[in-house]
Structures are given as structure tokens and as C-alpha cells.
Amino acid sequence: MNLKLIFLFLLLSNLLHSQTIDHILFEYDTAGNQIKRYTIDLNTGRSTNDFVKNTEDITKEDMILSDIYEDISYYPNPVKETLFIKWENNDFEYVTSIKLNSLSGQSLKSFTNLKGSVTLNIPFENLPHGLYTLVLEYSNGKQKTLKIIKN
């Protein structure tokens, strides 16, 4: 009987002191397929921001290549706070502005005077969760649109 009580006590104390998971974070490829899963542990004090890299730490391997446009890449998607986008310009066409729109088409943010730029950090922290479109406008009138998920 004493052995059963000791075992029960040890089992309960182990459960009370075990690690708890606050969130599960997923990483998706450009087609929307889940490719990685992260668990965030409250006991270690790691926040969800630990999985998002600073702009200077982003490598070519981290970047998500657009499935439609081979000259545009971005990181991360889904985004929590800031989206880093990179594109290629040439002499005949270059990005002049980028517009962030809601899925309904409402213009939320606009970034202009981008001639000579090939990267941009776009803040998402004050936007609600959902799906957004990012429209890159070129000097020759072309537009390229990306779908971005905000978690």
C-alpha cells in the first residue's frame, strides 16, 4: 500500500513539474504545406519571436521563393511582426512602389520611391490575423502580387 502511495505521489509531482507547451508554431512552404513544427515552452521563457530571424541574419536558404515570380523572395510567411521582401531590378523594369492590401482590396500601406532599392521590411505587428496581398508595381506599369498570411 505504501509503495502505491509513493508511486502515485512521484507521478503527480512529476506531472506538476513537467514542461508545459504554450504554443505550437508551424512553418509553411509557398504552396501552403506545413514543413516544420516548433513548440514554444513556457518554462524556458522562449517566445515565438525566437523563431523569426533579424534581417541581417536571414540567409538565402531562409528566403521563400515566390512560386509565380522567380525574381521575388520573402521571409517569413506566415508573418508575425515584419516581412522581409527582396526583388531583382534591371535597367528596363524596376520596382517603383509596393502596396499592402487587405484581401478585400482595401489599401493598408504604401511604400513609394523604391527606385534603386531591392529590399524592404514591411511591418505587420499592428495588423489583424488574416490574408493580405502585396502588390509590387514596376516602372513599366507591370504589377506582381503575392499572398501573405499574418499570424
Image: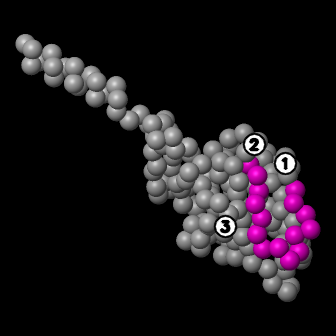
Element type at mark 1: strand
Element type at mark 2: loop
Does 3 sit above or below residue 61? above
63 sits left or right of 11 in the view: right
Q: Horizontal and vertical percent for residue 56?
A: 66, 67
Q: Which residue is mark 1?
A: 108
Would you say the residues marked 2 and 1 are in contact, meaning their CB atoms lie under 8 Å apart? yes
Q: Which residue is mark 2?
A: 127
For this orientation, the residue located farthest to the bottom is: 91
Cα distance in 3D space between marks 3 and 1: 26 Å
Within 10 Å of disc 2 (Cα), the crowding (few <14, some 14-19, many 20+) is some
Q: Horizontal and vertical percent for residue 124?
A: 74, 48
Q: Horizontal and vertical percent for residue 96?
A: 88, 70
Specify the quadrant that holds the C terminus: top right
Quadrant in the rendering for residue 118: bottom right
Does 107 sit above or below residue 135? above
Q: Tell which of 80 and 139 is nearer to you.
A: 80
Name the residue rendered at 69%, 49% in the picture.
81
Question: Mark number for residue 56?
Answer: 3
In the rendered structure, which segment of residues is drawn in magenta?
Answer: 110-124
What's the amino acid at mark 2?
Leu
What's the amino acid at mark 3?
Glu
Sequence-wise, the earlier of marks 3 and 2 is: 3
Name the residue rendered at 57%, 66% in the picture.
62
Name the residue rendered at 62%, 67% in the picture.
58
Q: Tell which of 131 and 60 is nearer to you.
A: 60
What's the amino acid at mark 1?
Leu
Sequence-wise, the earlier of marks 3 and 1 is: 3
Quadrant in the rendering for residue 16: top left
Res 149 visible: no
